[in-house]
Amino acid sequence: MHTPVLLNKALEGLEVTSGGLYIDATVGEGGHLKKILEKGGKVLGIDLDENQIKRFSEDKNLILVAGNFADIEQIAKDRGFFPVDGILLDLGLSYGQLTDLGRGLSYKNHSEPLDMRLSLGYENTASDLINSLSEDELYEILAKNAEEINSRAIAQTIVGTRRLTKIRSVGELIKVIDRTIGDKDEKVYLRVFQALRMEVNAEIDNLKKGLKGAVNLLKDGGRVAVITFHSVEDRVVKKFVTENKFKQMMRLKGNKGLSYERSATLRVIQK
């Protein structure tokens, strides 16, 4: 099992105690969830990807739900799991999703289709967006969701390319990017794939709804820990904290010596 980024610091920030109620709103491969259970906490685990939920065995202190953390408040109330002591949102993809899901979430898997849906409940795939949206709409997605400086040029090349042939696979999109920037640049690939995935899965809108619902479920003094992986997400969390005048108990950056951790930021807020 992949060890989650900032695992121990997130649990420290939540101040997990035996008998407490906790929601892991992004279960993933279960690293956080299992540690909370080991400390004696009772957990409601939520994940948009139902494949993540299926991997766990029954536990009297665990409730699992395949759902969107944007609906966290309704999910918890439907199961009588509130008010809670702490809530965790880890916004990173799991290793299994990148390598095994087969939906084009990684720029390294050239043969995979440009799907990018974390749940098949979403209607539009990344390929649908790439092959139907206008140049201005594609530019907006790349610029807004990933702050990619080549956004306009990439959008122009996408529109020019699809006039001749649809862009269906990861490898086909990589060729478009290479042709646009005149080089192979994994950082650009990463930003473009991030931007498309965020749009397909409505990630920013879900984050805003999830934060609001999470705070409504907390006991007085309860905490929410959020782990983000890029500045767009982190600004949403920072703005939420500032506008609602919540107390930020911890802000911590990932270890810059580790490739996956270095972009991570943990914020812990208290109601």
Image (spheres, rainbow, N blue to C red):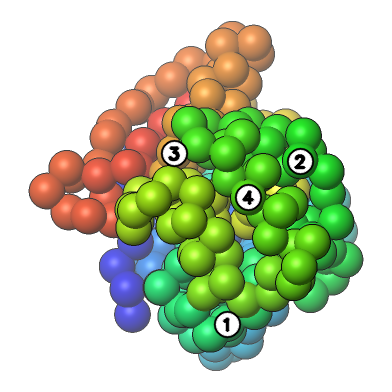
Q: Which residue is mark 3?
A: 230
The mark nearer the N terminus, 2 or 4, is 2
Separation (CA) of disc 1 from disc 2: 24 Å
How far across and how far down the image is residue 169, in percent?
A: 62, 76
**Residues at circles 1 and 2 in contact by the CB criterion of under 8 Å:** no
From this view, report whether residue 224 is shown above or below residue 170: above
Q: Residue at x 61, y 34 (%)?
A: 152
From this view, report whether residue 149 is shown above or below residue 227: above
Separation (CA) of disc 2 from disc 4: 9 Å
Which numbered tag is attached to residue 157?
4
The mark nearer the N terminus, 1 or 4, is 1
Q: Residue at x 55, y 60 (%)?
A: 176
Foreground: 138 or 190?
138
Q: Which residue is mark 1?
A: 112
Foreground: 106 or 25?
106
Label 4 neighbour load within 10 Å: few <14, some 14-19, many 20+: some
Lateral position of residue 181 relative to residue 260, left or right: right
Separation (CA) of disc 3 from disc 2: 24 Å
Residue type beneath disc 2:
Glu
Foreground: 137 or 240?
137
Residue type beneath disc 1:
Glu
Disc 1 vs disc 4: which is toward the camera?
4
Helix, strand or loop at disc 1? loop
Q: Residue at x 68, y 36 (%)?
A: 139
Q: Please indicate, yes or no, whether residue 213 appears anywhere in the rendered image.
A: no
The mark nearer the N terminus, 1 or 3, is 1
Separation (CA) of disc 1 from disc 4: 21 Å
Q: Which residue is mark 2?
A: 135
From this view, report whether residue 174 is shown above or below residue 7: below
How far across and how far down the image is residue 242, in percent?
A: 57, 11
